[in-house]
């Protein structure tokens, strides 16, 4: 791939990350995703993502890329925890509603319950997009083909 192609792909990934963070933040705010302390995590992280993107745009520094990488790993962890919390909450609700539920019937109800079980996976996707953008970024001072 040419350097120009790689630069274009980086711009697309960066824009995708920004659009995804703004959209996800907006959706969470509209849904009222702030009922307890655990629900603030994604809201704060998405603001952090947008802040570190702004930092990069203003400085183009290696430090801002490292900061974004940290935010991306936190998004991935947040997404995994979110899936766990959503599934656990749905399971707890279903067990209260139908105490004898088990097996496939329980699993189906848990996965299609009140809170979307896999929705927090969006945080994982955003984290992976950001890590792809930062991978061997030229501002880090490494040669593009270095291993």
Image: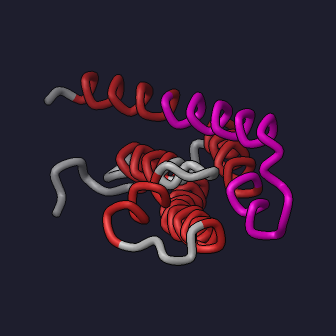
Which quadrant, please, contains the N terminus?
top left
Q: Which residues are magenta?
A: 16-43
Which quadrant, please, contains the C terminus?
bottom left
- Identify the residue at image location x=58%, y=63%: 90
Nearest the eye: 92 or 101: 101
Residue 9 placement: quadrant = top left
Q: Which secondary structure dominates the residues rendered in magenta? A: helix
Nearest the eye: 136 or 90: 90
Q: Is residue 89 magenta?
A: no
Q: Is residue 19 magenta?
A: yes
- Identify the residue at image location x=54%, y=69%: 91
Query: Can you say whether 23 is above or below 106 in the image?
Result: above
- Identify the residue at image location x=25%, y=52%: 143
Residue 81 in view of the camera: no
> Residue 36 at x, y = what percent?
84, 66
Nearest the eye: 66 or 128: 128
- Identify the residue at image location x=43%, y=65%: 106
Residue 35 in view of the camera: yes
């Amino acid at each position: 791939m040419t350097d120009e192609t790689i630069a274009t792909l980086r711009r697309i990934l960066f824009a995708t990350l920004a659009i995804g963070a703004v959209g996800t933040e907006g959706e969470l705010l509209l849904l009222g995703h702030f009922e307890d302390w655990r629900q603030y995590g994604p809201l704060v992280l998405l603001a952090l993502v947008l802040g570190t993107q702004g930092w990069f745009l203003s400085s183009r520094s290696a430090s801002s890329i490292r900061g974004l990488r940290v935010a991306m790993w936190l998004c991935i962890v947040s997404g995994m925890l979110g899936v766990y919390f959503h599934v656990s909450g749905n399971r707890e609700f279903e067990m209260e509603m139908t105490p004898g539920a088990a097996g496939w019937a329980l699993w189906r109800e848990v996965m299609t319950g009140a809170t979307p079980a896999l929705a927090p996976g969006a945080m994982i996707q955003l984290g992976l997009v950001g890590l792809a953008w930062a991978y061997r970024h030229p501002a880090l001072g490494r040669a593009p083909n270095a291993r």
